[in-house]
Structure formats: C-alpha cells, structure tokens
C-alpha cells in the first residue's frame, strides 16, 4: 500500500511541476477591493490546490471527531440499557426464587387436602 501511495503522490507532484513549467505568465488576483496580487498563474493555482487540500484535511478531521463523539454517545446509551436489563434479570430471579419457595408449600397443602377427603 505504501508503494501505491508513493506512486500517486509522485505522479501528482510531477504533474504540478510540468504544469508550473508551462504556465509562467503573470496573472492578477483581486483579494479584496483595492488589494491585488500579481504572480505566475502556476503559483496561484498550486496555492489554491494547497488551500483546498488543507481544507479537505480539516473537514476529514472534523468528521472523524464527530464520528468518535457519536460512537461515545452510542456506547453510553448501550451501557445504560445493559445496566437496566441486568437489574431486570436480578428482579426476575428474585421473583422466581420467591415463587419456588411458595410452590412446595402449595403442593404440601394440596396433598393434605387430597388425603383428608
């Protein structure tokens, strides 16, 4: 994978160099009213591409951060649900144990009723 990344970066850099060699004519950029910059067209376009790359990286970091925060919220919600379910299980176990204690007594009473008749 590193070789593929290297080849891609190398091809892009080579294309930028060839583009810069071919586009050396000066061009004027109007930044704000009354402020302008004159530089070769290739430099201006390379700077614009660099700014775009930086903005893409910032957006990527931002979305990764949002994904991590969303995952953290999901984990907290699931942990709360697990805790609730564990409490339900404990309550159900206690109810079953109580019912099992009452069942033998009920069977003994039924046996006495049957023998008395």
Image: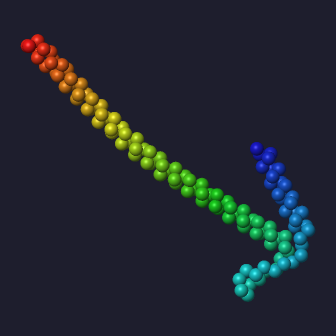
**Left or right position of 86 against 117:** right
Expressed as whole percent of the image width and height from the top left, the position of residue 64 reads 60, 54
Q: Choose between 74 and 117: the one closer to the eye.
A: 117
Which residue occupies the extreme left position in the image?
A: 116
Expressed as whole percent of the image width and height from the top left, the position of residue 33 reads 71, 86
* Residue 90 vertical placement versus 115 (above, below): below
Which residue shows up at 76% across the image and 69% down it?
Answer: 48
**Left or right position of 103 against 21:** left
**Left or right position of 61 against 84:** right
Which residue shows up at 47% across the image and 51% down it?
Answer: 73
* Residue 88 vertical placement versus 52 (above, below): above
* Residue 98 vertical placement versus 4 (above, below): above
User: Which corner quadrant holds the C terminus?
Assistant: top left
User: Which corner quadrant holds the N terminus?
Assistant: top right
Expressed as whole percent of the image width and height from the top left, the position of residue 115 reads 11, 12
Which residue shows up at 78% across the image and 49% down it?
Answer: 5
**Left or right position of 5 against 98:** right
Which residue shows up at 80% across the image and 45% down it?
Answer: 3
Which residue occupies the extreme top position in the image?
A: 115
């Amino acid at each position: 994978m590193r070789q593929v990344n290297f080849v891609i970066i190398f091809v892009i850099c080579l294309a930028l160099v060839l583009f810069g060699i071919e586009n050396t004519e000066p061009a004027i950029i109007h930044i704000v009213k009354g402020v302008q910059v004159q530089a070769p067209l290739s430099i201006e376009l390379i700077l614009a591409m660099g700014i775009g790359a930086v903005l893409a990286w910032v957006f990527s970091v931002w979305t990764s951060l949002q994904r991590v925060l969303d995952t953290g919220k999901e984990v907290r919600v699931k942990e709360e649900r697990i805790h609730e379910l564990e409490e339900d299980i404990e309550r159900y176990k206690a109810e079953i144990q109580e019912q099992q204690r009452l069942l033998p007594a009920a069977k003994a009473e039924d046996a006495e009723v049957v023998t008395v008749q």
